[in-house]
Image: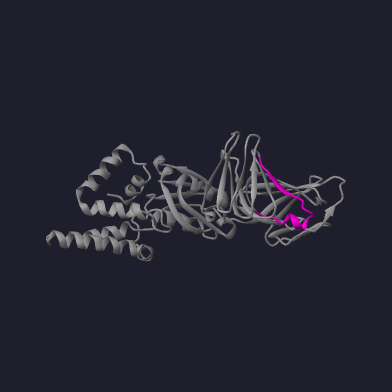
Amino acid sequence: MEFKLIVKKINNSLSEEETIVFQKWYDESDLHKAYFNKVKENYEEEHFLIDIEKGWESIEKQIKSVATKKTGYLKYVAAASIALLISITFLMKKDKIEEIVSPVIANNNIKIGTDKALLTLEDGTVVVLEKGKQYISENLECDGEELVYKSSNKAKEGIAYNYLTVPRGGKYQIMLSDGTKVWLNSESQIKYPVTFEKGETRLVELVYGEVYFDVSPSTDHEGAKFKVLTESQEVEVLGTEFNISGYKDEDAIYTTLIEGIVAISNRFNGIVLKPGEQSITKIGGKEIAVHAVDVKSATSWRDGNFYFKGKALKEIMNVLSRWYDFDVVFENKSLELIKFRGVLGRNQTIEDILASIKNSSIINNYEINNKTIILK
């Protein structure tokens, strides 16, 4: 039986035919039952589901070789072998046997994301920002990786706004004139004032995408509040770190608080988040849901990693497609709901990323053609 059926069973995504195959395997022996239960028990542990199919096949052969022994001894071997298999999970990848079926790579034009953005000035001028290219003007300067606005508090006389747009395959960092640091993920756009009015609420708009804020405290700005507007909610902070994700192809806004206090509201409700909590505001909805979350899963992108904690493969590929700028096709639709766990570096090539997923036995194979990935 293929190991991926065990994963699909845990995720309740087996087809009728696969259910029959799995159940037959499961009922064959107590060893199979024990192995399945051990995998299920450890499935939520980080890095567990890496590459244990080959390990299982090897252990199973060893156990079968002593099948003629006493039942008690066989049970001991089975339990010990399963424990050993779990303990060597991290080592198996290094000794993995070469897959018979190799990926099909044709004209791979998928590149690792980099620092790049488009700056739209108040007069409509668009400035291309990219790594290794400097840009300096009267009130800002850019070293190619970060855009920095000069500190200023304007008197109340009207505010000029800029837009920063990060395309697919890009990321960028900006320091606003009040000292607030902002990181933009791929396919994101924010609108913000060139300078903030003295004593007035500091207002920034997340037009779409994902942004991490490290807000300059209100105590440094005569008590001026800091607010972030999105399509369906308003976030008010006093000095804190938080992440907001609201992509155009998603039906909700996700706000994750790392430290400090934020108040989130829409036209119908309002809540206060505590560190380690995430709110979910449905587009056009009334309720604001709140639950505890591992903040690494929401903020790892800022530190150069993908942190997937039991996410469905369809969602994972959607995240990857923004950073590497590709289209994805699921040749086998049942793969979309299979979950994967792991931490992957954003500086890896797409082939390395796909190899990690393939080695986990989640997918049988994949194909890259120009900027399209086909999962099989």
Residue 62, can we see it? no
Residue 348, can we see it? yes
Horizontal and vertical percent position of residue 372? 51, 46
Horizontal and vertical percent position of residue 357? 43, 54
Seen at 30% across and 52% down, the residue is: 37
36 is higher (above) or lower (below) than 89: above
28 and 157: which is toward the camera: 157
Seen at 33% across and 61% down, the residue is: 86
Seen at 27% across and 58% down, the residue is: 57
193 is higher (above) or lower (below) than 80: above
Tell me if residue 64 is in the magenta stretch.
Answer: no
Horizontal and vertical percent position of residue 180? 71, 56
Please report the bounds of the magenta region as a residue range.
Answer: 213-230
7 and 33: which is toward the camera: 33
317 and 374: which is toward the camera: 317
Seen at 12% across and 61% down, the residue is: 70
In this rendering, the count of numbered labels is: 0
Quarter occupied by residue 16: top left
72 is higher (above) or lower (below) than 271: below
Horizontal and vertical percent position of residue 29? 20, 51
Quarter occupied by residue 215: bottom right
Applied colour scheme:
one colour
Tell me if residue 220 is in the magenta stretch.
Answer: yes
Whether residue 172 sits left or right of residue 291 in the image: it is right
